[in-house]
Every structure is written in C-alpha cells, then in structure tokens.
C-alpha cells in the first residue's frame, strides 16, 4: 500500500522548521560558550533568515509561473477551438 505523495513545500514542513531551530540553537551555544562572540551568531542567524525568505520567494515565483501557464493554456484553447456558428 503506497502513501500519496506529499506536495507540501519544504519551508512549510515541521521537520525543516525543527531542523533550523536546532541548528540555530547549537550555533548559538557554540558562539556564546566556545567562541565567545555573539556577533558571529547574529550574522549566521541573519544569513539563515535571508536564505529562508529567498527559498519562499522562489517557491512563490514557481506558483505564479505555473498559474500563468495555466491561464495562457486556457486562453489559447479558447481561441483555437472551432466555432460552431456554421459557415454554410
């Protein structure tokens, strides 16, 4: 028995959010305890946030492009369908 494919984007999955939180927590502990430089962690966290929003932006562009393609296909089908007005 196969399970249906999950079409949830990566940035919306719980596992990705937990993984990023654990990564940031571990790097925070490293920056405070071992390196003793909080600014190092701030830059790292800022980089993670920028990458997170960049991924969301790419996914949004993909959705927009897919829907525009569907609209274009529907319009081209409407213009190329034969007219049943009767040309006799």
Image (cartoon, helix red, strand yellow):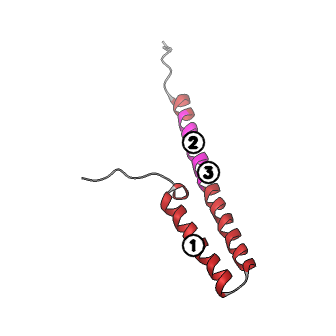
Q: Which residues are magenta?
A: 59-74
Q: Nearer the viewer, residue 53 or 17?
A: 17
Nearer to the camera, 19 or 29: 29
Eye-nearest disc, 1 or 2: 1
The location of residue 38, given as percent across then percent down, is 73, 78
Secondary structure mostly taken by the magenta-highlighted segment of the chain: helix
Q: Is 68 on the left-hand or right-hand side of 41?
A: left
Picture quadrant where residue 39 is located: bottom right
Q: Position of residue 65 (x, y in %)?
A: 60, 47
Vertically, is 56 above or below 38? Answer: above
| Front disc: 3 or 2 | 3
Q: In this rendering, would 51 be left or right of 11? A: right
Q: Earlier in the sequence, mark 3 or mark 2?
A: 3
Residue 60 is tagged as 3
* In this view, the mark in front (3 or 1): 1
Alpha carbons under labels 3 and 2: distance apart? 11 Å
Above or below — where is 12 with respect to 80?
Answer: below
The CA span between labels 1 and 2 is 35 Å
Residue under numbered circle 2: 67
Label 1 sits on residue: 23
Q: Residue furthest bottom?
A: 34
| Quarter holding residue 23 | bottom right
């Amino acid at each position: 028995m196969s399970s249906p494919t999950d079409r949830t984007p990566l940035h919306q999955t719980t596992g990705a959010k937990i993984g990023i939180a654990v990564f940031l927590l571990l790097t925070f502990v490293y920056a405070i305890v071992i390196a003793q430089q909080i600014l190092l962690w701030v830059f790292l966290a800022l980089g993670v946030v920028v990458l997170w929003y960049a991924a969301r932006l790419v996914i949004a562009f993909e959705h927009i492009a897919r829907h525009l393609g569907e609209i274009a296909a529907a319009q081209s089908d409407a213009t190329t369908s034969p007219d049943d007005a009767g040309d006799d």
